[in-house]
Image (tube, rainbow, N blue to C red):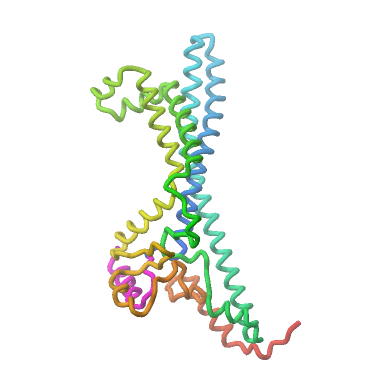
């Protein structure tokens, strides 16, 4: 937070506008990036394990005259574990970037389509089209949002805190990953590094380390089944702390982010608003380049005399 941003948000509150600090399109892109991260972790683990096994197998085969078959097997498992770890790390980064870029392009395409639809509706409305007039009177931008969490309109669509099928699949993958790391000796070095010497010594041997490794990675894998709605709700509150403005979010319907002070003054005049900003088209005032460009283009189009246009 800085002085400029603070005063900008104060002006939005006084004007009754949402005080989203990141912008109305940030929320959608963030969670698509998180989804890309999750998919990258899973895919990277599979690819890394495969490549690590191939490399480890080739190295073990070359070293067979010098080492025992048991040592060669441990070496293959170690390479597979390292490959899995590296694959998860690299592909999660790739997935995050890809998810964010894909969501950004999708959002830009939707905004452009809404702009074109709006221009067509303006011409239709001038020709007396009732549907176009209604569309212009109630603009709606489905990717313009001011909160991370949007309650579903249909209560029957609400889901519990865990998607059990995803959690069980993640648990199975995590247990296998934990066993692989323990068999290759990687888990031993990891726990020895993060634990106090007396605690590590109290584990009692390889069996305990294997169990601890499987439990740790199993829990990590199962966590992929947690409903992201929980995370979205947490982000709504932590964002409010970062912005310096407490917010209230309606439980019975999607609610626009509103400060407590504004809510008290507006109780008699407005009901809880939807998370999608009602005046998204035309866009609300902004200092950003794209919205300034849109405002200028709109002014030019409005100054045109459409009555002189002839149909093809």
Q: Residue at x 49, y 25 (%)?
A: 79
- Quarter placement of the C terminus: bottom right
Q: Main secondary structure of the magenta part?
A: helix
77 over 241 or under it: above or below = above
- Residue 45 x, y percent position in the rendering: 50, 34
243 over 30 or under it: above or below = below
- Quarter placement of the N terminus: bottom left
Q: Which residues are magenta?
A: 1-20
Q: Magenta includes 7? A: yes
- Residue 303 x, y percent position in the rendering: 57, 88
User: Splitting the image into 4 quarters, where does residue 62 fall?
Assistant: top right
Residue sitting nearer the eye, 202 or 298: 202
- Residue 92 x, y percent position in the rendering: 48, 42
Q: Residue at x 58, y 79 (%)?
A: 134
User: Splitting the image into 4 quarters, where does residue 30 fall?
Assistant: bottom left
Task: Return the residue found at the far right.
Answer: 312
- Residue 65 x, y percent position in the rendering: 53, 9
169 over 209 or under it: above or below = below
């Amino acid at each position: 937070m800085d002085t400029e941003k603070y005063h900008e948000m104060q002006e939005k509150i006084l004007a009754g506008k949402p005080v989203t600090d990141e912008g109305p399109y940030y929320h959608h892109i963030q969670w698509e990036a998180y989804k890309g991260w999750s998919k990258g972790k899973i895919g990277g683990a599979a690819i890394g394990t495969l490549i690590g096994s191939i490399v480890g197998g080739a190295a073990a085969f070359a070293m067979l005259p010098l080492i025992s078959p048991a040592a060669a097997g441990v070496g293959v498992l170690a390479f597979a574990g390292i490959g899995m770890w590296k694959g998860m790390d690299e592909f999660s980064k790739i997935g995050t970037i890809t998810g964010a870029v894909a969501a950004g392009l999708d959002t830009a395409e939707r905004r452009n389509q809404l702009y074109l639809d709006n221009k067509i509706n303006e011409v239709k409305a001038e020709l007396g089209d009732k549907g176009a007039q209604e569309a212009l009177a109630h603009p709606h931008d489905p990717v313009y949002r001011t909160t991370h969490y949007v309650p579903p309109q249909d209560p029957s669509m609400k889901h519990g805190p865990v998607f059990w099928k995803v959690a069980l699949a993640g648990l199975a993958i995590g247990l296998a990953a934990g066993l692989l790391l323990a068999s290759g000796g990687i888990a031993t070095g990891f726990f020895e590094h993060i634990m106090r010497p007396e605690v590590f010594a109290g584990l009692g041997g390889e069996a305990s380390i294997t169990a601890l490794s499987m439990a740790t990675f199993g829990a990590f894998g199962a966590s992929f089944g947690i409903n992201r709605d929980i995370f979205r709700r947490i982000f709504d509150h932590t964002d409010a702390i970062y912005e310096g403005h407490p917010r209230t979010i309606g439980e019975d319907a999607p609610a626009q982010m509103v400060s407590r002070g504004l809510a008290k003054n507006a109780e008699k005049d407005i009901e809880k608003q939807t998370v999608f900003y009602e005046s998204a088209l035309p866009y609300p005032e902004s200092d950003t380049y794209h919205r300034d460009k849109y405002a200028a283009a709109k002014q030019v189009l409005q100054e045109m005399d459409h009555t002189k246009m002839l149909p093809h």
